[in-house]
Amino acid sequence: MSEPIDQRPRAQNQLEQHLSEVQLLLARQRRVEALVQKQDMPRHELVEGLVHRQHLVELHNLLRRLSAGEIARVIEALSEEDRLAAWREVEENRCELVLEIVSDDVRAELLGARPHSSARNMLSAFELKNGRLSQVRIDSRADLANVNPMWVDLVAPSASVRAWVGEFFELYLPDPEEVTDIEESARFYIDDNDAVHMSSNFLLDKQGDSRNVPVAFILHRNILFSVRNEELPVFRLQRLRARTQPGYVSDGKDVLLDLYGADVEYSADALEDVYAEFERVGRQVLSPQVSDDEAAEILSEIAKGEDLNGRIRRNVLDTRRALSFLMRGRLLSSDQHEDTRQILRDIESLDGHTSFLFNKINFLMDATVGFININQNKRVSKLTAISVVFVPINIIAGIGGMSEFSMMTAGIPWPISYGAFTLAMGALGFGTYHALRHLEQRKAQQTLVARQRKEA
């Protein structure tokens, strides 16, 4: 029992050592490059290229010795500048494994620095070996002749890649953005070659960006083809499970059902995040006072939660339609039927949660708008009180501006008469203000006493 405990610090020390070595190589590269750029020497570009290549070769060899998991942890620990420099030195055939391990934010950053453009990065083929899915490297059309795939996954494929893959397997691979019709007959059907065509939306929930991504599925000759224009967490999860768990899938239909099941799980996790966010927003709304700025922020969070909740509801509705089509078409075995029913039961439970969240959204929205109205009423009440204070003053000022006032004060020097007149206006305004304040405090005290009597 002591050996696993002793291995944890050792693994951590190894990670820190690898991280230090990578940071040291990158620091040396930047330092030498800066020094070379400042020097004025013949064949400057050649010298700079040699120095640059020397450190990159050392970094490439270091990363080559590490496992995909170690590379992922090292890259996540680096700064943004160092992370991108190290990522460019990772071997291309290991990029897919590293991308599956790193976090979503880091993955998006790495894909932006080194986008997938080759057929190898657009196309993934998986064979069933010893009960596990095994990814086969596909660089060209000729490589397809040497594999017996159970699942062919295409991510953002070019038209040419879709064309030669479809030509090899004798089917048409559509652009998923072109199969987004609402009609069920256009999204789920069986063609003349007995190929099953399905188009479904899968949820992609990133921080500050949630959307439904269309995915086209084709079941042809017991092979599942999936086509989409961007990477999805559900597909990464499915690949990892099928690679590590023997017997997890046995044919293309199992892969398809597991993808739908993983999508429902992903939607449930997103709903949990919505619940947590609304709990925080609810505490703000139920606080004694909410300012206008806080109310605006709350309304923004409610709108984001409502948008995500609506996308989740649309997503599970689309999944239910797809599973119902598979069951009606009698395309599944008895075990797969039972798996499908379980997924449908999970979807029914999510329907209750999305309905509850819609009601909660309406409550929070109404409460927040109510606070905005209360704050507005308070401002209007203050303006009304100010106008009440100045009404008597305006009346006296109007009288003072009449010619009769001059006749009444004819025997009094004007500095004294107008000074007394001004003091009278100030005293009247002061008295009116305190009278209003006394009445307001008295009303508040009566309300408090009545509340205490009611509670008693």
Image: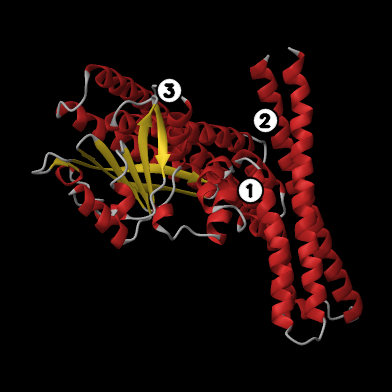
Circle 1 residue:
64
Q: Is residue 200 visible?
A: yes
From the top left corner, tell me how far across and down residue 169 is, in percent: 21, 47
Circle nearer the N terminus (2, 1): 1
Residue on which the image places disc 2: 447
Asked if 113 appears above or below 274 in the picture, the reply is below
Mark 1 burial class by Cα count in 10 Å: few <14, some 14-19, many 20+: some
Residue 100, percent from left and from top:
52, 42
Pair 3/2: label in front: 3
**Quarter occupied by the N terminus:** top right
Q: Element at badge 2?
A: helix
Q: Are marks 3 and 2 in contact (CB under 8 Å)?
A: no
The span from disc 3 to disc 2 (Cα, nearest Å) is 71 Å
Indicate which disc, 3 or 2, sits on the residue closer to the N terminus: 3
Chain-order first, disc 3 or disc 1: 1
**Disc 3 packing (10 Å; few <14; some 14–19; many ≥20):** some
Q: Amino acid at mark 3?
A: Pro
The residue lying toward the viewer, choosing from 217 and 122, is: 122
112 displayed left or right of 182: right
Q: Nearer the viewer, mark 2 or mark 1?
A: 1
Q: Which residue lies under the disc numbered 3?
A: 246
Q: Position of residue 245 (x, y in %)?
A: 46, 24
